[in-house]
Amino acid sequence: MSGELMRFSVAMPEDLLMQFDRLVARRGLAKNRSEVIRDLVREALVEEECGIPGREVMGTLTIVYNHHSNDLQQKLHHIQHEFLENIVSSMHVHVDEHNCLEVIVLKGESSLVQDIANMILGTKGVKNGKLVTTVTRQLF
């Protein structure tokens, strides 16, 4: 794959283009339409790659929970110890007197990483959370 830039044109409705231009402006002075389109294509390719069964991925699972919930921290620790090979690290933040935020770094086969995240997110007392995955090998 060469690093040579190829030109192509894109047609879209004017209102969509206006919204896109606002996105380009929010991304900063160093960005233009072409660079933002490249960013969006890269993001879509990584997202698709992460969904391929058997693909090795890394991810961050961010959760918020009330640390006063009955034995919730014990349950979360149990899950993390059960998957020691897949849990790279975690960071615990005390948000306020009731709530904690935890970021858990995971690695492994895509469906296993998703399963671990679902176990944690489904644990009673976890208020909300989100898994974000990526691939570590270069795609483009």
Image: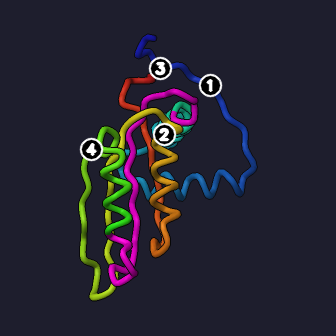
x and y percentages locating residue 79 in the rendered image:
38, 55
Relative to 35, residue 96 above or below = below
49 relative position to 99: left or right: right
Amino acid type shown at disc 2: Leu
Mark positioned earlier in the residue sequence (4 or 2): 4
Relative to 82, residue 103 above or below = below
Residue reaching furthest top? 1
Query: In the rendered image, which residue does mark 2 sit on?
Result: 112
Mark positioned earlier in the residue sequence (4 or 1): 1
Quadrant of the image containing the N terminus: top left
Q: Is residue 37 visible?
A: no
Towards the viewer: 29 or 45: 45
Local packing at callout 2 (Cα closer than 10 Å; few below 14, some 14-19, many 20+) is some
Amino acid type shown at disc 3: Leu
Query: In the rendered image, which residue does mark 4 sit on?
Result: 88
Quadrant of the image containing the C terminus: top left
33 relative position to 14: left or right: left
Measure the C-alpha gap from mark 2 to mark 1: 39 Å
Measure the C-alpha gap from mark 2 to mark 3: 37 Å
Local packing at callout 4 (Cα closer than 10 Å; few below 14, some 14-19, many 20+) is some
| Helix, strand or loop for disc 1 | loop
| Helix, strand or loop for disc 2 | helix
x and y percentages locating residue 121 in the rendered image:
49, 62
Query: In the rendered image, which residue does mark 3 sit on?
Result: 5
Mark positioned earlier in the residue sequence (2 or 3): 3
- The answer to whether the residue labelled 3 contacts the one labelled 1, judged by CB atoms less than 8 Å apart, is no
Local packing at callout 1 (Cα closer than 10 Å; few below 14, some 14-19, many 20+) is few
Measure the C-alpha gap from mark 4 to mark 1: 42 Å
Query: In the rendered image, which residue does mark 1 sit on?
Result: 8
Measure the C-alpha gap from mark 3 to mark 1: 10 Å
